[in-house]
Amino acid sequence: MSNVAVVGASPNEERYSNKAMRFLKEKGHTAIPVAPRHERICGAEVHASLRDVPHEVDTVSMYVAPARQETIIDEIVERAPRRVIFNPGAENPGAYERLETGGIEVVEACTLVLLRTDQF
């Protein structure tokens, strides 16, 4: 399985990012919460930014609105994960070319649906 950074993770169990954290774990992935204002989410240590994640990151699951993504996109390019999943509401077509130029696959999809349908 893979390491998945959930950018915009929330401790609120009603938020899709939290549901994704739990479902990723259930499916055997390592869910790494990335959020600047929390210490633990779903039992995992939270990292303030992608730069702070000490593990290799295979996939970034994006739950942050495009208006707040500029620094995050820079961090993604630096980390060079295999892919970024832009969940509904986080789509950012203006960043896709930069990511793809860096060899990063861009996916517009819902992480929960991908997991549920075995397309993750």
Image (spheres, grey):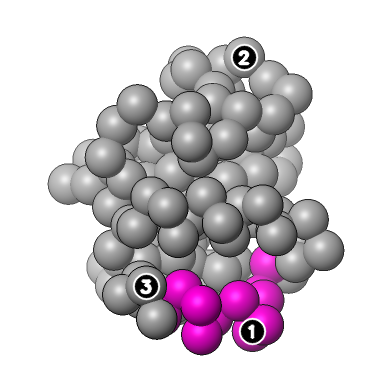
Residue 55's spot in the image, x, y percent? 29, 32
Residue 8 painted magenta: no
Residue 67's spot in the image, x, y percent? 82, 63
Q: Amino acid at mark 3?
A: Gly
Mark 2 is surrounded, within 10 Å at the Cα level, by few (under 14), some (14 to 19) or many (20 or more) other residues, namely some
Task: Report the predominant secondary structure element of the magenta stretch.
Answer: helix
Mark 3 is surrounded, within 10 Å at the Cα level, by few (under 14), some (14 to 19) or many (20 or more) other residues, namely some
92 on left or right of 68? left
Residue 3's spot in the image, x, y percent? 29, 42
On screen, residue 26 above or below 64:
above
Q: Secondary structure at mark 2?
A: loop
- The quadrant where residue 117 appears: bottom left
Q: Residue at x 56, y 56 (%)?
A: 74
Residue 98's spot in the image, x, y percent? 51, 77
Look at mark 1 in the image and give the residue it sits on.
93
On screen, residue 78 above or below 48:
below
The stretch in magenta equals 90-100
Look at mark 2 in the image and give the residue it sits on.
39
Q: Amino acid at mark 2?
A: Glu
Look at mark 3 in the image and give the residue it sits on.
102
